[in-house]
Amino acid sequence: MLGYLQRLGKSLMLPIAMLPAAALLVRLGAEDIFDIPFVTAAGNGILNNLGLIFAIGIAIGFSKDGNGAAALAGAVGFLVLEGGYKAINDELNLGVLAGIIAGITAGHLYNRFSDIQLPDFLAFFGGKRFVPIITSVTMVIISGVIGLLWGPVQDGINGLGDLFINGGAAGVGAYGFFNRLLIPVGLHHVINTLIWFDFGTFTDAAGNVWKGDINRFLNGDPTAGHFTAGFFPVMMFGLPAACLAMYVTAKKHRKAAVGGFLASIGLTAFLTGITEPIEYSFMFLSPVLYGVHALLTGLSMMVAYWLDIRHGFGFSAGAIDYFLNFGIAQHPLLLLAQGIVFGIIYFLLFTLLIKKLNLKTPGREDEDEDYVEETEQTGTPTRGKGAKDYDNKSYHYLKALGGPENIKSLDYCATRLRLQINDMEQIDEKELKRQGAHGVMKVNRTNLQVIVGTTVEFLATAMKKRMDNNNMEAPGHVEKQPVEEKQPEQGSTSYEEIAMPVNGKVIPLSEVPEQVFSTKMMGDGFAVEPTDGIITSPVDGKILNVFPTKHAVGLRTKSGLEILVHIGLDTVKLEGSGFDVYVKEGDVVKQGDTLVKADLNYISKNELSTITPIIFTNLLENQTVTITQTGDLKTGTKPIIEIK
């Protein structure tokens, strides 16, 4: 359940990320700034359709490959759901919850049905086209259930919202405390979504109904802004002051190493309100400090409430949002004074606790000799080097994570990598931190989170590229193969006994309807018209490469003969659909081991040939392939060819 909620929290980040655009438009067009009504209306066009936007974003987040068909299904699901339940009970208003329900449903249905094959007369509606169809049917059923049964549930949610909103200082304080406390497991986005976009209702002069603290604040609700105001003193002043405390208490020889790092994440928090890099820098090294931080956040929320300060943001409680919404805030200057006080409190408390309890904050950790030596010689640890060389960083991150084979899945959210790991013992936390990670969190025996910062998307993309290409060569390294491995000696293949890789009919390359193969541009060999899709290794050898689109595998025998098994013709167009790969680069295989399972029906229904060429790519110029057996043969039959 925790993993599922974390997945939901990650999916929420995509729709939440567009909120700054909406808030910026609403504020720039407001009367107190440029007074351009259509600009404000444009921003409210986003805020008015948050349910639809959440449905699209969450569907993408839950889908296995982020395909646009999942997004379309999410949109269709939301429209069907909202239209259906309102027709039954027009007093219901699920708001963004309808988008969350539709998005989750569409994402799961995409994963289940995106590869479905329908009968020939319905083939046009198969595959990804089927997903919006099945989503609409499913949402009709769900809308009926919601229309009939959701009334008490909505009353309960509204009651919970009223409990928070009408809870006064205790309500906002509890929210602030749990908002920070849930960050380590990534569930703060879930509670934020309810507070920001669902709890509370305000009807403006034009009759528009707004739900959630952020939407109500931006559109003039005089009671909104209490659930966001108290974050400004913490994010603009408190946490940057904590960075200063960690710098002051760092070991003397480490100050230069951590100073730039702490200054940069402190400035980021002040300007933008992005605080996770700071929080993760001490969260696991010194949990007691994080507990103090959560309590201080709750206290800041309560103080802002007692002082009757109202302020809001479209993205986060940084200086940019503070000044952007200054004109519609209540007592914003008083909020600055509160921020200065909280900055002093954070600095004094953090400094005192770090020294008295000897807490291992950045610059005070127990160091290995290599780290100390590197820092003393260069003045900066590895994390400061090559920050934008994401291919280089991805290589070192993958090594520290135990290699691609130790990673079951890789995803990311706003600031962290989210991974499923096969063996947690292979994780090198020290190396991850040397490469720039702000923190490492082992959620359970298989789930791992690595806090990278706002550049996480670029790092994750580089890591996925290496994983997809089975590439773990060090950056800049070009592997040089010995000459004797590149080319077999003449006549040395007589003992190879190439075996039939798949059940089917052997045909010469000259009969392959593809010029690249029939003219032997890639090399000599033979081809098979397969009768099943289980492709096995024709030899004992090593896997040279597996194509990213899964339709071809390269092997090398001990004698150096290189073989390409190309499943189907022009099947690169399928982009991996219809193929399940059972090997990876570097694997040692025996003759008869399964390489790939191919869905021949899927290949044929996409109007592609299943003919499978087997090409010897490094024969000598005077070597030729002669087929010794023809007709239908079974997997493992040998010898079927002779190389002279």
Image: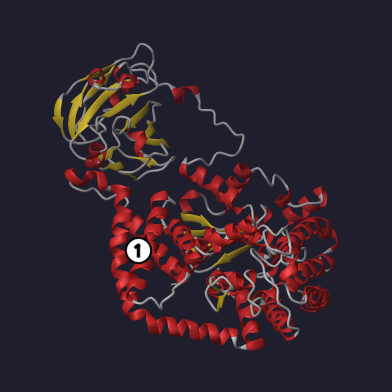
Q: Confirm whether residue 361 shows in the render.
A: no
Q: Quadrant of the C terminus?
A: top left
Give 211 or 181, whichever is nearer the viewer.
211
Residue occupying the point 79% across, 53% down: 375
Q: Which residue is mark 1?
A: 80
The x, y position of residue 36, in whole percent, is: 67, 57
Residue 555 coordinates in the image, percent (x, y): 38, 33
**Residue at left 30%, top 15%?**
624
SS at mark 1?
helix
Name the residue furthest front: 206
Up-down relation of residue 86 to residue 561 (above or below): below
* Displayed quadrant of residue 485: top left
Query: Can you tell which quarter of the image residue 639 is in?
Result: top left
Label 1: how many residues lie within 10 Å, few (<14), some (14-19) or many (20+)? many
Nearest the eye: 411 or 582: 411
| Front-lying residue, 139 or 426 | 139
Q: Residue furthest top?
A: 622
